[in-house]
Image: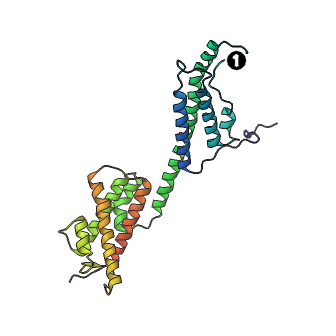
């Protein structure tokens, strides 16, 4: 018979984790079980102490809940005991305590091995997420000024700098279009996009609806200066890839609206 790829055992169903959060919850649950095992001191805890049975039951149940009844992990650990070595009828208590003490490191290793496996799955999720977000960034139709300022920084993983430079590019664009170079940041935005007498208007300012829209955009431009530009100019805290993508997309949208605005100054 020709050799082929190994076939899965009948009835075995490996666990497929749907989300990163599900993996993290599983890791947290096993870390609690690990702490319980490490809390058993064979110098003060007998092999037949009820706490030992509780710890073992908690571990078995955790494996069942995380991986499912037909998983390889549960099949391997469903009958787990904190024990290492032989067992026979009428074994003296001293020997049974020794087997229990010898079994603790093996149980600790069993739990830690499951946690390591989940850690690998978590890393796989992180790689998939980063790849997806980078692909989404390449699909954005960014305003040219925002793209020029931030695209290469984003592609190279400098997410905080990408958001900061996109914010500065938007600020410079406002200064250039309004010809107002003596103000900066939020003060610039409040002055240039004022509800009642703006330098740059987004509409005809014919009625309260127009003026409300004008005021709303004023607050959006003001907000990105306060919430995006200023913190990144004074701290080194980085943005995640998905956060940076959403911030840059918002800055690009404002740049596009700015491009369509009209200057009211003579």
Q: Is residue 244 above or below residue 202?
A: above
Front residue of 78/146: it is 78
Front residue of 82/188: it is 82
Please tell me which residue is depicted at 59% across the width and 25% down the height of the picture.
106
Please tell me which residue is depicted at 60% across the width and 24% down the height of the picture.
49
Q: Is residue 35 above or below residue 217?
A: above
Please tell me which residue is depicted at 41% across the width and 57% down the height of the picture.
243
Scheme of image coloration: rainbow
Residue 10 horizontal side relative to residue 229, left or right: right
Q: Is residue 95 visible?
A: yes
Q: Mark 1 points at which residue?
A: 87
At which x and y percent is residue 216?
34, 74
Residue 83 horizontal side relative to residue 226, left or right: right
Front residue of 242/220: it is 220
At which x and y percent is residue 196?
25, 81
Q: Can residue 258 be seen in this view?
A: no
Q: Dot 1 surroundings within 10 Å: few (below 14), some, or many (20 or more)?
A: few
Residue 3 horizontal side relative to residue 61, left or right: right
Quadrant of the rendered image containing residue 50 = top right
Residue 111 horizontal side relative to residue 69, left or right: left
| Image quarter hosting the C terminus | bottom left
Disc tally is 1
Quadrant of the rendered image containing residue 102 = top right
Please tell me which residue is depicted at 65% across the width and 40% down the height of the picture.
64
At which x and y percent is residue 226?
29, 62
């Amino acid at each position: 018979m020709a050799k082929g790829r190994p076939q899965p055992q009948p009835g075995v169903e490996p666990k497929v984790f749907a989300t990163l959060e599900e993996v993290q919850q599983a890791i947290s649950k096993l870390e609690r079980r690990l702490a319980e095992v490490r809390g058993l001191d064979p110098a003060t805890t007998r092999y037949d102490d009820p706490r030992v049975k509780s710890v073992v039951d908690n571990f078995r149940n955790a494996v069942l809940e995380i991986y499912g009844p037909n998983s390889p992990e549960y099949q391997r650990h469903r009958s787990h005991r904190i024990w290492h070595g032989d067992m026979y009828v009428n074994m003296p208590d001293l020997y049974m305590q020794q087997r229990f003490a010898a079994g603790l490191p093996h149980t600790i290793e069993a739990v830690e091995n499951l946690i390591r496996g989940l850690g690998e799955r978590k890393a796989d999720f992180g790689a998939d997420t980063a790849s997806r977000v980078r692909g989404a960034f390449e699909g954005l139709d960014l305003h040219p000024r925002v793209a020029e300022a931030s695209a290469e920084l984003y592609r190279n993983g400098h997410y905080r700098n990408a958001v900061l430079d996109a914010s500065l590019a938007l600020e410079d664009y406002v200064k250039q279009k309004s010809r107002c170079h003596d103000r900066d940041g939020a003060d610039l935005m409040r002055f240039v996009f004022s509800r009642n007498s703006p330098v740059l208007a987004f509409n005809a300012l014919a009625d309260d609806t127009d003026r409300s829209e004008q005021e709303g955009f004023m607050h959006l431009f003001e907000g990105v200066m306060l919430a995006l530009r200023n913190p990144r100019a004074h701290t080194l805290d980085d943005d995640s890839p998905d956060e940076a993508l959403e911030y840059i997309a918002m800055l690009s949208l404002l740049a596009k609206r700015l491009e369509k605005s009209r200057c009211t100054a003579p």
